[in-house]
Image (cartoon, rainbow, N blue to C red):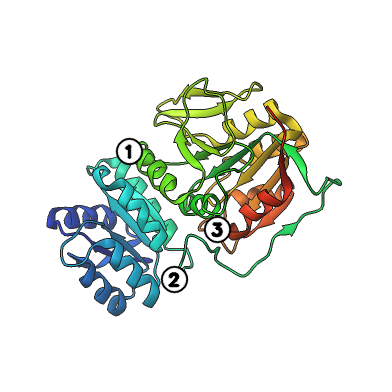
Amino acid sequence: MADVRVLIVDDSPLVRDMLADILMSDSGISVVGMAKNGLEAISLTQSLKPDVVAMDITMPVMDGLEAIEKIMSTTPVPILVISDLDHSKIAFSALSKGALEVYQKASASEAMAKELIAKVKLLAKVKVIRHISPNNGRGSGRSVKLPEPPKASSQSFQVVAIASSTGGPRALAQIFSSLNEAFPVPIVVAQHMNDGFVQGLVDWLNGVSPIKVKFAADGELLRAGCAYFAPAGTHITVNAKGRVILQARAADDLFHPSCNQLLVSVGKAFGAYGVGIILTGMGDDGVEGIRCIREQGGYTIAQDEASSVVYGMPRVAIEQGVVDWVSPIGEIAGLLKQRIRPKPI
């Protein structure tokens, strides 16, 4: 018997059949139902109680955004948005309604099939709650200070670097939306993301954030009040002069962009004047980078288990003793505002 039960929602019969064929090629997944619009999705979610809903956004009768909001307020379930590039910004808006992840609708290649199957299995393990909001962290936990050498309650910093993966876009929105446009230092982000959706992610975050969210240009000088992302096909790092260094990504790079490359560059370039944050995500990318920042005297924060979609990257960093504070996602912006005072680059 299959372990993961999936409901597919798309107005195209061809797409529904393609997704069903891909998912059911894995013996651990069964497709328990199909819906052609959001209204049907709500009804089938309530009656079938699937482990995961794979849903398009643009559909007749009721679109995916409205359906996601209603599902998450009545019958919470992990929702994977599968959308095409033309609607990537709208797709990211689904995260604020409660969807967990956005995935690019593409051809049924072997690589795409493996990635989609892995994503569905991963999301099936996530515990979700009602009325998820981008401005509130899940869980009722508080920030926890871990044992560390004494550090000042407020320090001079020059840059904040953030590493994130699965669940990261919504976590970033929660942080960015709680900062003000005069945030005193630049932020540089390595968010694992399919190249086709990077533009939509940046556009969406820029729309919900008081700070400016943008793609970095090679050699660009970092500025306070801005959050910088790697353009498609690149890794993002920084140098001691406060400038962005972009590197072309190799086709076989496991993580894109690399969290470790960014965080290590911050540790080496800024030493005790760098802040490293590791957010929700699978695996351990970013852990060595967080270690580098902490060993250089910088300040490190990890998202807590209760508010993480996938408690992988933060867990490894905490277990290896390279984190100063463990915090619910809803309190990380407050920690930054409380503890950071700028030091000119």
Image quarter in which the C terminus is found: top right
Q: What residue type is labelled 1?
A: Gly
Give the label on residue 196, or none.
1
Q: Where is residue 43 in the image (x, y as percent from the top left)?
A: 25, 76
Q: Residue furthest right?
A: 150
Residue plotted at (30% across, 60% down): 54
Q: In this view, does 86 lie above or below 19?
A: above
Q: Where is residue 158 in the image (x, y as percent from the top left)?
A: 68, 33
Query: Which secondary structure lies at badge 2?
Result: loop
Q: In this view, does 266 lie above or below 319?
A: above
Q: Is residue 99 above or below residue 222?
A: below
Image marks 2 and 1: residues in contact by CB distance under 8 Å: no
Q: Position of residue 60 (x, y in %)?
A: 15, 62
Give the label on residue 308, or none.
3
Comes first in the chain, label 3 or label 2 = 2
Q: Which amino acid does label 2 sit on?
A: His
Q: Which amino acid does label 3 sit on?
A: Ser
> Toward the viewer: 12 or 30?
12
Image marks 1 and 3: residues in contact by CB distance under 8 Å: no
